Image (cartoon, coloured by chain):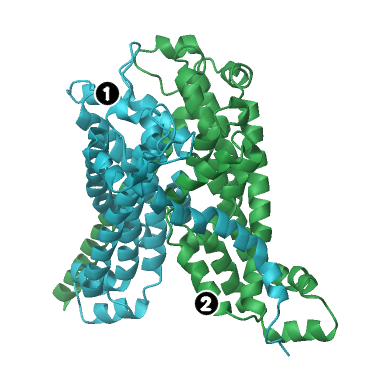
Chain colours: A cyan, B green
């Protein structure tokens, strides 16, 4: 029989517990302590007192406000477009049989690539240099437009590349999940609808969409969370000095405060990180509330 | 009678035509996006084979190479320490993944097969750890590792990257599906728990273990934030930081073809891994991956 209380179990758990306590539990508590320690000095490891000064500093920092603005724009643009477009691709994939595997494999490729490396390729494609305007600009010229410097140029040009790259990067995951959700809808429903002579748009609205709504909402929620944590993709396109490029994100601000040219302020970093997660938590709760109303769980 | 039959044939023809048009539209849409996905890869491979002079001589870039050269690849290994970056990343990936598999397996085994007081409570605590965003814990970990004098060391890179709570959950689910009878039989034979775990449980749950390993390898190979925070000595850079370093002050001047060669070298291992383990990776990601 199973021993009711096996003390050896703790031996098996020990490594995991040590890693978890040292690198997860203690840090999550500590980050709150840091965020209220005023005037914390990294070298002497002393602070001058406790209070909410760090939060007020961060909230009044123009770099932080710029980062918040950038992040919100990225979220608002990329989450709906990437989810909608992924649904479109998944529907198309689901309606074909030939070459389907091939398309699925190709579409998944960006997921396994190093974002820093491929970002460099995007930079080359969009960048305007002394030698050449870059491929994208040549394309724009071909259609009669003027060249734009997408990497060092106007704000909206940079934002466009940023969002385009984010969508390119996040699409594989969404397409994969939506394709398997669509494939798992019971064919019986479609056949019944066909017998009734239901139009294809109506079938989509009344059968397909409700059946895959849990996956869609899962993607929307994780999409929001992921987009709010946007950082590496921005570095890939605009380099490490995101403040100078005016393209910093909230997570980027946290890391800049912690380390780098403007770094050495774990207290400010903690305050900014906590503000970020208050935002993310709020949005996620709103998402969950909305999903309760609209998601159909079988 | 004739009239009706003709009508039906005509309607069928019309239907067929509609279907063909629909198929053409769908396939061209899919192909268009496929091109969009593949184009950056094509462009990086193409550019990496162009010589510096010919690349900069092309005001309108060519879509083919006239005189392919390997010099960019040799430059990537000789002018910047790309080999060093690759070796570092390889060591980091292998050690982190190996330690993670051991730690996760032992924990999942305890949670699924051994009885002890407070098991369910502890498991709930474990699960709640999944919700902790890495951005919050990175700050203290940075301070911890810095104070422990582990900046620019492999320990500093690896230790905080090991634990993945989600994989404990995934593996425990799989372990729980293994019939109890096997365990009792092993116990009767006097097999130790550890032996049972490695001889019976792990072989049965191999697909899940493989999935976990592959996902972790991808994560390690592409990790950027933690290595950037904890290393400023080039000798300990991983590929992500390496490519950033190459971009900022790599080849002296803006040598795009050489940069693209470095990008190709860095991307290749994971692309090969993906093509070999395509099914496992896609199945694994749809079960437990999050990104985007």
**Residue ID at (48%, 50%):** A105
**Residue denoted by label 1:** A137
Q: Residue B18: where, in percent of width, then height?
A: 23, 59
Vertical side of A217 occupied by B36: above or below: above
Numbered mark located on residue A18 in the image: none
**Residue denoted by label 2:** B121
Residue occupying the far front of the picture = A48
Residue A61, quarter of the rendered image:
top left
Residue A14, quarter of the rendered image:
bottom right
Residue occupying the far left of the picture = B3
Residue B281, quarter of the rendered image:
bottom right
Does residue A91 appear in this view?
Answer: no
**Horizontal side of residue A61 vs B255, given as left or right:** left
**Residue ID at (41%, 24%):** B63
Q: Quadrant of the image for the N terminus of chain A?
A: bottom right
- Whether marks 2 and 1 lie on the same chain: no
Cα separation, mark 2 vs mark 1, equals 59 Å
């Amino acid at each position: 029989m199973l021993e009711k209380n096996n003390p050896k179990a703790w031996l098996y758990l020990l490594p995991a517990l040590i890693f978890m306590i040292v690198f997860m539990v203690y840090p999550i508590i500590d980050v709150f302590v840091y965020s209220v320690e005023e005037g914390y000095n990294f070298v002497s490891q002393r602070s001058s007192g406790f209070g909410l000064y760090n939060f007020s500093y961060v909230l009044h920092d123009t770099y932080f406000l710029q980062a918040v603005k950038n992040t919100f724009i990225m979220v608002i643009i990329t989450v709906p477009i990437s989810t909608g477009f992924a649904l479109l691709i998944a529907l198309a994939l689901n309606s074909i049989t030939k070459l389907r595997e091939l398309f699925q494999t190709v579409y998944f490729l960006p997921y396994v690539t190093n974002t820093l490396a491929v970002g460099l390729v995007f930079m080359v494609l969009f960048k305007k240099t002394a030698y050449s305007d870059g491929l994208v600009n040549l394309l724009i010229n071909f259609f009669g437009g003027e060249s734009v410097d997408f990497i060092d140029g106007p704000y909206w040009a940079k934002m466009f590349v940023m969002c385009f790259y984010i969508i390119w990067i996040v699409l594989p995951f969404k397409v994969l999940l939506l394709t398997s959700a669509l494939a798992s809808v019971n064919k019986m429903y479609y056949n019944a609808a066909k017998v009734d002579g239901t139009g294809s748009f109506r079938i989509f609205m009344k059968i397909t969409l409700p059946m895959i709504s849990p996956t869609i909402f899962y993607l929307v929620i994780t999409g929001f969370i992921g987009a709010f944590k946007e950082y590496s993709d921005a570095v890939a396109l605009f380099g490490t000095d995101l403040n100078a490029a005016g393209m910093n994100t909230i997570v980027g601000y946290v890391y800049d405060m912690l380390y780098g040219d403007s770094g050495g302020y774990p207290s400010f970093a903690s305050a900014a990180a906590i503000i970020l997660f208050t935002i993310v938590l709020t949005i996620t709760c709103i998402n969950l509330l909305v999903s309760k109303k609209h998601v159909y769980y079988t | 009678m004739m009239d009706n039959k003709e009508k039906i044939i005509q309607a069928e023809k019309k239907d067929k035509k509609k279907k063909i048009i629909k198929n053409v539209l769908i396939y061209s849409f899919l192909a268009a996006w496929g091109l969009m996905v593949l184009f950056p890869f094509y462009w990086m491979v193409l550019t990496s084979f162009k010589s510096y002079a010919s690349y900069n001589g092309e005001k309108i870039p060519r879509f083919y190479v006239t005189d392919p050269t390997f010099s960019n690849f040799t430059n990537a290994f000789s002018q910047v320490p790309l080999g060093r970056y690759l070796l570092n990343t390889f060591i980091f990936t292998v050690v982190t993944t190996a330690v993670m598999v051991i730690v996760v397996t032992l924990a999942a085994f305890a949670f699924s097969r051994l009885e002890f007081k407070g098991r369910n409570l502890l498991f709930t605590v474990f699960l709640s750890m999944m919700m902790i965003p890495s951005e919050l814990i990175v700050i203290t970990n940075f301070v911890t590792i810095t104070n422990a004098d582990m900046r620019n060391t492999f320990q500093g890179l690896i230790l905080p990257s090991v634990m993945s709570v989600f994989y404990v959950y995934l593996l425990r689910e799989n372990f729980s599906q293994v019939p109890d009878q096997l365990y009792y039989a092993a116990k009767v034979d006097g097999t130790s728990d550890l032996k049972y775990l490695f001889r019976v449980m792990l072989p049965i749950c191999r697909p899940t273990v493989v999935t976990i390993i592959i996902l972790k390898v991808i994560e390690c190979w592409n990790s950027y934030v933690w290595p950037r925070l904890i290393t400023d000595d080039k000798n300990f850079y991983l590929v992500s930081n390496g490519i950033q370093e190459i971009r900022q002050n790599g080849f002296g001047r803006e040598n795009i073809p050489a940069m693209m060669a470095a990008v190709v070298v860095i991307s290749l291992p994971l692309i090969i891994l993906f093509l070999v383990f395509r099914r496992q990776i896609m199945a694994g990601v749809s079960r437990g991956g999050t990104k985007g």
